[in-house]
């Protein structure tokens, strides 16, 4: 089920109906990352200008500036998950409408979240993701745990956020949480796919559109399995509690 959703999303990302959305998503993602890069570089530059060693040892100043730039570049990998959440919150309904109309034409389409609500969810997740990834960044110089913490945290966060955005088009928030918990391992595995893509340069810029399409497919397939199991209403029960 997960792999079929992954392959379907990979097909969708470069399909003509989503290509225009993809370019917009890439432009917004690159713009946000560039703004973060410029802001951090400017702050570090101001700090170095005021440091006494900068005037006495210009070479140290140059080396520090180079290392700061390289450090910011590495840090952007940790900032990509929260940035992608904001972008996904903005474009998810556009992606979902294309996927649902083309691949599930006989089913009732989802209801687009109000833009403010979608962006609120994206910003809420971005804040949590930023906090978690800053903690992971502090472990950068500890081999082993840094990658494990980074991967595990983002697998959980990305899986949860993208799935809830996709399912939120069909269910109230409390039902979405129950459904996610019922399928926690599948959703976590989907998040692991996205967390793995974060580690791949350039490809990681596709996460907002790919993640949205993948979770739309995954949610649809999970609902089909629930209906096939005998719940003709598709109503979510309260047997599970969110974790």
Image (tube, grey):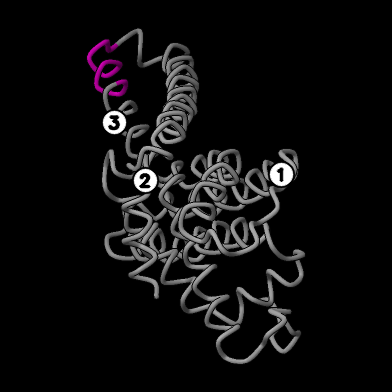
How far separated are the C-alphas under marks 3 and 1? 32 Å
- Up-down relation of residue 19 to residue 224 (above or below): above
Nearer-N-terminus badge (2/3)? 2
Q: Secondary structure under badge 2?
A: helix
Which of the numbered marks, if any, corresponds to residue 70?
A: 3
> Is the C-beta separation of discs 1 and 2 under 8 Å?
no
Q: Residue at x 26, y 16 (%)?
A: 62
Q: Residue at x 60, y 83 (%)?
A: 227
What's the magenta region?
Answer: 57-65
- Tell me residue 91's x, y (percent): 56, 40
Decide which of 134, 153 is in the foreground and name it: 153
Q: Secondary structure under badge 1?
A: helix
Residue with the mark numbered 1: 120
Residue with the mark numbered 2: 13
Quadrant for the C terminus in the image? bottom right
**Magenta stretch containing residue 61, yes or no?**
yes
Which of the numbered marks, if any, corresponds to residue 236?
A: none
> Is the C-beta separation of discs 2 and 3 under 8 Å?
no
């Amino acid at each position: 089920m997960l792999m079929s959703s992954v392959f379907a999303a990979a097909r969708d990302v470069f399909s003509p109906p989503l290509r225009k959305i993809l370019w917009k998503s890439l432009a917004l993602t690159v713009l946000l990352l560039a703004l973060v890069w410029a802001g951090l570089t400017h702050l570090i530059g101001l700090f170095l200008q005021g440091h006494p060693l900068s005037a006495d040892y210009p070479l140290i100043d140059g080396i520090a500036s180079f290392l700061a730039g390289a450090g910011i570049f590495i840090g952007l990998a940790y900032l990509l998950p929260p940035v992608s959440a904001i972008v996904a919150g903005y474009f998810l309904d556009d992606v979902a409408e294309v996927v649902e109309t083309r691949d599930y034409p006989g089913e009732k389409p989802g209801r687009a979240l109000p833009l403010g609500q979608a962006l609120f969810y994206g910003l809420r997740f971005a804040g949590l993701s930023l906090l978690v990834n800053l903690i992971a960044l502090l472990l950068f110089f500890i081999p082993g745990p840094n990658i494990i913490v980074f991967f595990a945290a983002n697998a959980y966060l990305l899986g949860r956020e993208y799935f809830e955005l996709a399912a939120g088009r069909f269910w109230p928030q409390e039902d979405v949480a129950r459904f996610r918990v019922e399928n926690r391992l599948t959703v976590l595995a989907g998040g692991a796919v996205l967390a793995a893509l974060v580690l791949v340069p350039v490809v990681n810029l596709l996460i907002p559109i790919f993640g949205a399409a993948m979770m739309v497919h995954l949610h649809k397939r999970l609902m089909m399995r629930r209906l096939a199991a005998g719940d003709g209403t598709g109503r979510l029960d309260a047997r599970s509690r969110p974790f």
